[in-house]
Image (tube, rainbow, N blue to C red):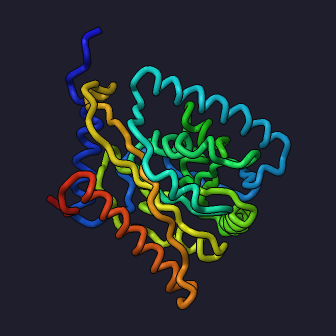
Amino acid sequence: MEEKTQKSPERLKIIEKIAEHERLGLWDKDVEDDPETIVLTPDKVDYLGKKLSSRIGSFFANRAAVKYYENEIKKGDFVIKAVNGIENYLSVNGGAVITCNHFSVYDNYAVYRAIRNYLPKGHRLYKVIREGNYTNFGGLYGYFFRHCNTLPLSSHPKTMMNFMQAVDELLTRGEKILIYPEQAMWWNYRKPRPLKSGAFRLAVKSKVPIIPAFITMEDTDRLDANGFNIQAYTVWFLPPIYRNEGLSDKENAEYLKNKNYEIWKDLYEKVYGIPLKYGE
């Protein structure tokens, strides 16, 4: 079959938007044309899977997700080249917030696949997602967003209260929660972006460490459906970051956030062999 060489105009537009957002420092702003967000009310989400219907839905959705992503890997459309630093992940017993850069709908599965054999029996990798992905995203990905152990944010105060309580309970009982502190997904963007504080406030509140994960990329010789080189991912788990007992909760959240960014920046510069610069 002849490979597609024409680059998708839609993806080229996204790349231009990313470059513009980088120049303007709009680090957490969306660049994708995602559906309009519908407010997530408390009755529409069962964070802790207390309902039988939620548990059944999660069981089948997770099986479908694994089948889908593993098929993508088998076809060569999703490439995980290596996993490095798994000993850093394994050094943490109990609950933790895993942070990761966000550049693809595949990145959360890359993290999950790297740790799935090390999760205690009955434990899951929970993922914090944006409100609109849960309430108004269609198709297969929308199905995964609603059922695969996701913890959607919400603009509804009561729902957010339930979210906070659920996160604390999950972390206290020893679960791992994946959070994207950059917030928005920037397609195939390789640089670490300045981080938001939410993930680190949650870790401080629940008294758990941060496990920084970062995924680096390199071009393969195959093109994707949009005419761009498929990326080969290397998943890095970096040394966990613990709170400083001499600081207040507010100061600790800032400390964890800055330390996480510093660790990501150092790895980026080491792997790619270039200094981290923006707007160029």
* Residue 9, picture quadrant: top left
Classify residue 161 as left or right of residue 50: left
The quarter of the picture where the C terminus appears is bottom left
Q: Looking at the image, which is closer to me, 202 or 32?
A: 202
* Residue 233 position in % (x across, y down): 37, 40
Task: Provide residue 52's location: percent of width, then percent of height.
Answer: 85, 42
Q: Residue at x 64, y 64 (%)?
A: 156
Left or right of 275 in this view: 244: right
> Could you say where residue 172 lies in the image, as x and y percent from the top left?
73, 66
Task: Give above or below for 192 relative to 55.
Answer: below
Whether residue 261 is visible to the viewer of this picture, yes or no, is yes
Q: Which image quarter holds the N terminus? A: top left
Q: Residue at x 22, y 56 (%)?
A: 20
Q: Residue at x 29, y 37 (%)?
A: 11
Q: Horizontal placement of 144 versus 196: left or right? A: right
The picture places residue 110, in percent across and down from the top left corner, at 49, 41
Which of the two residues, 240 or 251, is positioned nearer the viewer here? 240
Task: Give the vertical position of 116 relative to 245 (above or below).
Answer: above
